[in-house]
Image (cartoon, rainbow, N blue to C red):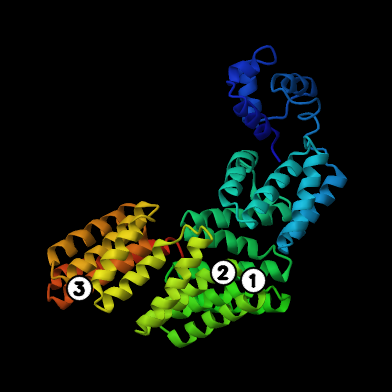
Amino acid sequence: MVLANRIKKLRETLNMSKEEIAKGVVSYSHYCNIEAGRFVPSQDILFALEKKLKVPKYYLVHYYKKDNELEQQLLTLKVKLDNLLLEDAKGVLNNINQTYFLIQSIYQETFYYLLESYYYYRTGEIDKAFTIFEREVVPLLNNVDEDNLYTDLKEVYYYMLAVINFHQEDYYRSYKYFLKQEFLVKSNIQRAILNYNLALIHSKLNDAKTGINFAKTALNLHLQERKWDKVAETDNLLGVLYWESNNYVKAKEHFQKAFEIIEQNQIESLKPRVLHNLGLVTKSNNEYEQSITYLTESLLLKKKMNNQDLVVTYILILESYIDLYMFDKANSLLEEAKRFSKSKIEEYLLQIIEAKLHLQQKSNDEYEKSIKKALTYFEENKLWKLLSFYAEEFAEYYFKKRRYKQASLLYKTVALANKNLMGGMNYQKGK
């Protein structure tokens, strides 16, 4: 690990310039070479820098010195997190925090922050996890050769990079880091989670067939470990993947299996999501009344649980009302849905619903105007999956009206969106 990275991180934390740190210790150019990692300074200089950087004695001098007891606790913490034993992990993490005010070894300090971010990601505090990673881990691993990292640290590092890139919708980079992690995982639960994540990425990339294979592997591994919450979650994902493949029978089977497991094991947190998806698949089968029943129950549970993901369920109910020609109900519910909109994306999705209502009332110009605005926003913000879906829907509208030139341009937009969605992925779909 690089001592220079620790020195730079400490200086930037104190908001001090290089000139301020160097003054009275070494020349400015000498200090710049230290921070650039061109050499490790003498012990006397490190002692002087410790005073300047307001850290305890030996924090820089003993940057290589490992604590054997701490090492065991860090490895124990990783095993607990890998196997989803989150309460046990919390106990180990609290013990480390109470015992170690400062960690001298740069390797162990980096590993600790990585595991801390990993813990918060596992417990669902995603923003906190990513903040710790960016603030504490990234500066310490800047310009460090990944090949020289210890295996356990490297495995968590790849996992965190994979999930961060996934949340940033950079699915190619996420896929790349999950594949790097794949060769380092040790437990069945880790392998199951890895396969689940690879399935999810392929869903995002419109490659449901490949995603199904990964999800089946994940499901079998979770069943072996009797992790029923993860079994339900994976059955739910398989349902989505089969739905994306237009196999509504298989999709419904997996959603119903997920719902049964949820009921048997009282996994309330997953219930709104699965009910939403049962509404989705029944709507696709033109069972609109049953769909509305599922979706309304999902919406009520989401509100009860203060779930923020309400608009997506409102949209399916609204589409069902439109398909049933229940325009008064749709207009009324649309106004309610707008009050729960939390983002620009949701605003545009609701505008598309409003446009579809205009279309039913023969206001073609209003429909086209609203859809074009939404497509422009999706393209400008690189929301490739939304762009692909709604551009294709709009192209079909033009095609039915025999406006073939406009339809052709939109199909080109769909192709461009799908190409961008795939990014640098270099594999054959449906393998």
Secondary structure found at label 3: helix
Question: Callout 3: 10 Å neighbours few (<14), some, many (20+)?
Answer: some
Residue linked to disc 2: 270
Where is residue 240 drawn, in percent x and y? 47, 75
> As drawn, is 277 to the left or to the right of 96?
left
Q: Earlier in the sequence, mark 1 or mark 2?
A: 1
Q: Nearer the viewer, mark 3 or mark 2?
A: 2
> As drawn, is 70 to the left or to the right of 289?
right
Q: In this view, does 391 lie above or below 173?
A: below
Q: Residue 229 carries which label?
A: 1
Q: In this view, does 14 lie above or below 303?
A: above
Q: Distance between the residues labelled 3 and 2?
A: 36 Å
> As drawn, is 326 to the left or to the right of 64?
left
Q: Residue 401 carries which label?
A: none
**Dots 1, 2 in contact, CB < 8 A:** yes
**Dots 1, 3 in contact, CB < 8 A:** no
Secondary structure found at label 2: helix
Q: What residue type is labelled 1?
A: Asp
Is residue 382 visible in the rendered structure shown here?
no
Q: Nearer the viewer, mark 1 or mark 3?
A: 1
Q: Work out which residue is located at the far bottom of the displayed protein and give it.
A: 249
Where is residue 285 drawn, in percent x and y? 37, 85
> As drawn, is 331 to the left or to the right of 97?
left
Q: Residue 397 carries which label?
A: 3
Secondary structure found at label 1: helix
Where is residue 217 drawn, in percent x and y? 62, 77
Q: Which amino acid does label 2 sit on?
A: Leu
Q: Residue at x 60, y 71 (%)?
A: 195
Question: Callout 1: 10 Å neighbours few (<14), some, many (20+)?
Answer: some
Q: Which residue is drawn at 48% across and 83% down?
A: 252
Q: Residue at x 45, y 67 (%)?
A: 299
* Quarter assignment of residue 295: bottom left
